[in-house]
Amino acid sequence: MTVALIDSGLGLLPTSAWLRRLRPELDLLLSLDPDGAPWGPKPAEWVTDRVLAAVDRVVGLGAEVVVLPCNTASVTALDEVRAHLGDAIPVIGTVPAIKPAAAASRSVAIWATAATTASAYQADLIARFGNGADVVGVACHGLADAIDVGDAESVRAAIDAAVAGTPGDCDAVVLGCTHYPLVADEITARLPAGVTLFDSAPAVAAQTLRRIDRLGRELRGSGSVSVLLSGRPGGLPASALSYRAGRELAAPAR
């Protein structure tokens, strides 16, 4: 069975790596968009068209399940993708882990891109899932871009700026961009002791597997990992190998 994951950049790596760890027999098709990245600042109609074009490509290549491990793609195009594909192909989106964080803590910071931090979408999630906790958004300027290109110095600088903007009494940080789990260890090292990180990638992978199991199909596959770069067959960017998830996906299937 082939599962396709669609994102503009390396934000699809954490969920992809979780899927490979949990079901190594799955074939993964990773669709990145270096020509159009980043998607966050782009108009909604442009992003929707870009995502739908990627969906058509991966389905044409045999994808039986589609995952959008990207907050921008999920917010902007998830409903359109589901309507476009109908019921035959499950489509799984991504939501930041605000609900579990607010259930476990009374003071929560959501680290996200500047666009997401200022969005009505995030405000709605806080209103729906904040559970009475004190939830604050922290814009992590440049962090996702630095992760995409593997610029370790810029990653450190962006994390330090985000830590400085996080209230001192926060004991939970939600990683509200799917790129950020790639540098979770660096984030943890710079936050005060006792702060818990909440990452949506394990939950998205688990939901994907639940949807696969509901299909009732035999999971035949070789554990292959294929990559599309703006629709062209290719490989993972060199920067992906800077991260554990990227190295796991680049390794031969077990």
Image (tube, rainbow, N blue to C red):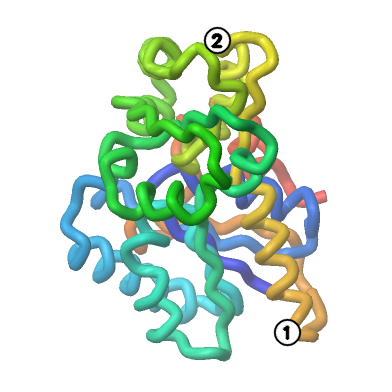
Q: Which residue is mark 1?
A: 215
- How far, Cα to Cα, is label 2 from label 1? 43 Å
Q: Which mark is residue 80?
A: none
Locate residue 14: give its quadrant.
top right
Check the image and report above or below for 244 versus 79.
above
Please identify, in this view, whether the residue under mark 2 or under mark 1 is nearer the observer. 2
* Relative horizontal placement of residue 156, taking residue 218 as reference (left or right): left
Question: What residue is rendered at 66% in x and 26% in y?
Answer: 196
- Image location of residue 163, percent across then percent down: 45, 14
For numbered disc 2, what is the local secondary structure?
Answer: helix
At label 1, the amino acid type is Leu
Question: What residue is rendered at 69% in x and 15% in y?
Answer: 194
Question: What residue is rendered at 55% in x and 21% in y?
Answer: 170
Check the image and report above or below for 238 versus 122.
above
- Image location of residue 22, percent across then percent down: 79, 54
* Relative horizontal placement of residue 2, taking residue 138 as reference (left or right): right
Q: Nearer the viewer, residue 134 or 151?
A: 134
Question: What residue is rendered at 38% in x and 28% in y?
Answer: 138
Q: Nearer the viewer, residue 61 or 80?
A: 80
* Relative horizontal placement of residue 74, taking residue 207 as reference (left or right): left
Locate residue 145: give its quadrant.
top left
Q: Which residue is mark 2?
A: 190
Judge whether residue 238 can be spotted in this image: no
Viewport quadrant of the N terminus: bottom right
First reached walking from the N terminus: tag 2 or tag 1: 2
At label 2, the amino acid type is Arg
- Image location of residue 238, percent across then percent down: 47, 32
For numbered disc 1, what is the local secondary structure?
Answer: helix
- Image location of residue 167, percent across then percent down: 45, 17
